Amino acid sequence: MKAFQKLDDFLDFCWVQISRGKADKKSPARHPTFVTSSLDGFPNARTLVMRRSDRKNNQIEFHTDTASSKMLALEENPHAVIHFWLPKVQLQIQMDVDVEVKFGDITIPKWRNVPSNSRIAYGTIPSPGTVIESPLAYDHSSDQKRFAVLVCHIQSIQLLLLGVKHIRACYKKTTNWQGEWLSP
Ligand SMILES: Cc1cc2nc3c(=O)[nH]c(=O)nc-3n(C[C@H](O)[C@H](O)[C@H](O)COP(=O)(O)O)c2cc1C
């Protein structure tokens, strides 16, 4: 178990783990949980593939279908939470983020990099979440107009490392990621 004495080292460790999510398809950091506030008041959590992480600009990026319900939720409230649990290193990461939604022509350069067999995730008919008659009563189409990029601007990061003695810390953009230890 790692025993961090310095807040900066703990945050560096977090970012190394997150960047593995992009580099290593088997890393659990590839599949965080993305939580929005839904219109009926219940938080809404779902797994998404992390498409990009950028420590320098404090960003995490996801791709989704413009017709999915998370888009409506984000229109109402762009604040969201990203949650990672990385069992090998016993690290939980929680992030508060502000989500910038990009769709339309601006996403064309990213769309070009989406493999053709993955493009069918953007354009399901009827829209995701629609009630259907039977399990396979839907069609796939690949539609660039249904492709959205969610750029998550990280506002805070909370870390919990499990061990003989747990370690917990919180870092905020407003304090330039200086960090504070928290009682676990
Ligand atoms: C392993 C895994 C990866 C997923 N990756 C994505 C993804 O990258 N983008 C996406 O929109 N949905 C992805 N999904 C589906 C979402 O979890 C969710 O069901 C879908 O986006 C509809 O969500 P919503 O109705 O809450 O908007 C993934 C699901 C799983 C299980």
Image (cartoon, grey):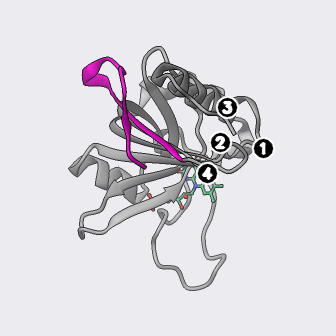
Amino acid type assigned to the residue bearing label 1 in the image: Lys
The residues bearing labels 3 and 1 have C-alpha atoms spaced at a distance of 10 Å
> Mark 2: which secondary structure?
helix
The residue wearing badge 2 is 30
* Label disc, if present, on residue 121 of the rendered structure: 4
Residue in front for this viewpoint, 171 or 107: 171
> Mark 1: which secondary structure?
loop
The residue wearing badge 3 is 22
Amino acid type assigned to the residue bearing label 2 in the image: Arg
The crowding category of the residue bearing disc 4, from other C-alpha atoms within 10 Å (few below 14, some 14 to 19, many at least 20), is: some
The answer to whether residue 170 shows anywhere in this view is yes
The residues bearing labels 4 and 1 have C-alpha atoms spaced at a distance of 21 Å
Amino acid type assigned to the residue bearing label 3 in the image: Lys
Do labels 1 and 2 touch, CB within 8 Å? yes
The residues bearing labels 2 and 3 have C-alpha atoms spaced at a distance of 6 Å
Mark toward the start of the polypeptide (2 vs 3): 3
Q: In this rendering, would 161 be left or right of 152?
A: right
Q: Position of residue 144 (x, y in %)?
A: 53, 38
